Image (cartoon, coloured by chain):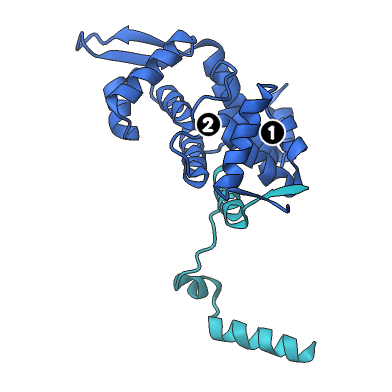
Chain colours: A blue, B cyan
Amino acid sequence: MDFMKLQAKRAMTTRGQKSCLVIDHLVEALAGDPSSSLRRALVLNRIDEKPGITQTEIMRELKISKSAMNREIEWLFNYGCIIRQNAEEDGRAIKLETCGYSKQALESALDYFPKKHKGLQNLLNRYIKVLKQDRPTLRDARIIATLYDKGETTKTDVIDSLYNGPATTDNRAYNKLLEDGVIKDDG
Amino acid sequence: MTVSLDPLINAELDMCCAKEFDGVEPLSLTSDFGANVGTNFGDVAQTISMGMNLG
């Protein structure tokens, strides 16, 4: 699709639809795993924003503990989302870069943000804030993005908008949001 | 049975999405609001009150 058509299509998309599409692209960028945390998406976004950034720099900037950071980097590397290279100036430091399918899917998400990475970072941080959980996932974010888009709908519609994962996992995520008062039903 | 987002969260997401997708800055409800639009809250209250009387 050429640039003008793409722009026209995006202009016709509502904010709610954009929110859903952004989350879908992030799920795609993170190996199709909706259980990925929003924090992991933040890490991927930061690596893409600054190719060659080191793990220590991200830890400091995003205020993530060393052990949590190690886990995220291992996961991203194992699923082919990033490459690691030894820094020339410091053999112990490892430089990180996004690559392949992950980079491509992330770019699709970034297309919706005039401020690119900074815009995506702000939206992810907002989701983390409103979800009120220790480790909110992309699945949680997709549930509230669906409700933001549709206004009022049924539980079935919300669950159907998710990623064909195990029904128990989707239901657990839905019930947790209900319990936390993030979403409300009329029952 | 229908389900919806908590209204406050909905408003918060809406402000964030307006800003990040469309570059729309949220209106500030602090003291500079009246200055920016060249009015004050007293006038607004009076106008609403007049409208209610007419209605």
State if disc 2 and disc 1 touch (CB < 8 Å): no
Image position, residue B51 (x, y; %):
73, 86
- Crowd class of label 2 (few under 14; some 14 to 19; many from 20; radius 10 Å): many
As drawn, is B51 to the left or to the right of B42? right
* Mark toward the start of the polypeptide (1 vs 2): 1
Horizontal and vertical percent position of residue A58: 33, 27
Q: Chain of mark 2?
A: A
* Residue at x 20% of width, y 8% of height: A91
Image location of residue A5, percent across then percent down: 74, 29
Residue drawn at x 75%, y 91% is: B53
Secondary structure state at the residue bearing disc 2: loop
**Disc 1 residue type?**
Gln
Q: Residue at x 50, y 37 (%)?
A: A124
Please identify the quarter of the rendering in which residue A47 is found: top left
Determine if residue B16 is in view. Answer: yes
Q: Identify which residue, B20 or A2, lies in the foreground.
A: B20
Residue A137 tag number:
2
Give the residue type at disc 2.
Thr
| Residue A7 numbered mark, or none | 1
What's the residue at 68%, 29% (across, down)?
Answer: A162
* Callout 1 secondary element: helix
Residue A186, percent from left and from top: 73, 53
Q: Chain of mark 1?
A: A
Q: Nearer the viewer, residue A28 or B30?
A: A28
Up-down relation of residue A31 to residue A49 (above or below)? above
Q: Is residue A142 above or below residue A108?
A: below
